[in-house]
Image (tube, grey):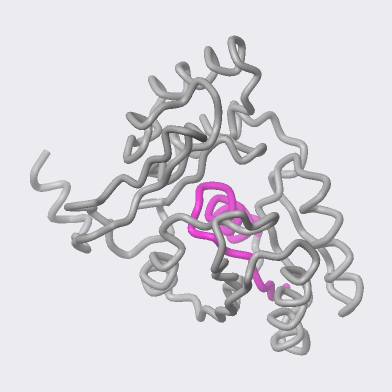
Amino acid sequence: MKLAALFSGGKDSTYAIYLAKKMGYEVKYLLTIFPESKESWMFHHPCIEMTKVQAELMGIKQLIRKTKGEKEKELEDLRKLVEKVKDEVSGLLSGALASNYQKERVDRIAKEFGLESIAPLWKKDRAKSLEDEIKEGFEIMVTGVATQGMNENWLGRILDLKTLNELKKLSENFGIDVGGEGGEYETLVLDCPLFSKKIVVKNFEKIWDKKTNSGYIVIKDFDLVEKENLKGRN
């Protein structure tokens, strides 16, 4: 079955593509919404422009549409993207984990165009899902933070098993969602088994708002590195 994948460049949408391919699906298109506002209800904001690089590294055609980030108008923008590919695919793939708001709207759009809604991560344990991603070779950078308990120092950090344990403690102390499903943090995948090369971030700027205890990074410079070269350095 051929799929169109909703793609933000973050850990869950990328991992959903990885799992779908392992399950035998063909991911023909990446559908990416570029929010013009960081207050988007449904779509990832920090470093969204890096999805163009990730799409090239996966060898999958990407379709992009900008949205102003207004609640229901976002869905119309997504609907228009899906409409472009509806005759070439049979399913709509998403990385939805626990957000009923997101899942219900993706399901609705899929049904409208006669597509199957596929969400391989749906209702999976968030900590286990993140652990699996790390163990499968996903290098995940924190690109945005917006919650009590997470400060500016989280921006630019790589999620590994140590940081996963830190997130679990934050969940116990502050009630945050370990997977970031409540918008607590946003991510960017720098490397995974789907990528032909690894993204190495050389320089980034932190944008931080002390009043709201939230912020995000802007990537200023990066390299694409052959994975064989990386092995040679070890």
Left-right relation of 128 to 223: right
Residue 53 vs residue 42, the one in the foreground: 42
Q: Residue at x 52, y 57 (%)?
A: 45
On the image, which quarter does residue 162 sit in?
Answer: top left
Residue 137 visible, this orientation: no
Q: Could you tell me which quadrant the C terminus lies in?
A: top left
Q: Position of residue 178 (x, y in %)?
A: 59, 27
Lateral position of residue 14 relative to residue 206, left or right: right
**In the rendered image, which quarter is residue 115 located in?**
bottom right
Residue 49 in the magenta stretch? The answer is no
> Is residue 202 visible in the rendered structure shown here?
yes
- Toward the left, the furthest residue is 233
The residue nearer to you, when weighing 159 against 37, is 37
**Magenta residues (range):** 1-23
Determine whether 121 is above or below 105 in the image: above
* Vertical placement of residue 227 versus 170, above or below: below
**Residue 218 horizontal/vertical position (percent):** 33, 55
Horizontal and vertical percent for residue 127? 59, 26
Q: As drawn, is 18 to the left or to the right of 90?
A: left
In x, y percent, where is residue 67? 63, 73
Q: Residue at x 50, y 52 (%)?
A: 10
> Which residue corresponds to the image point at 77% horizontal and 37% vertical from the top-left?
123
Q: Does residue 73 appear to the left or right of 33 in the view shown?
A: right
Q: State which quarter of the image contains the N terminus.
A: bottom right
- Residue that appears at 65% across and 18% down: 175
* Total labels drawn: 0
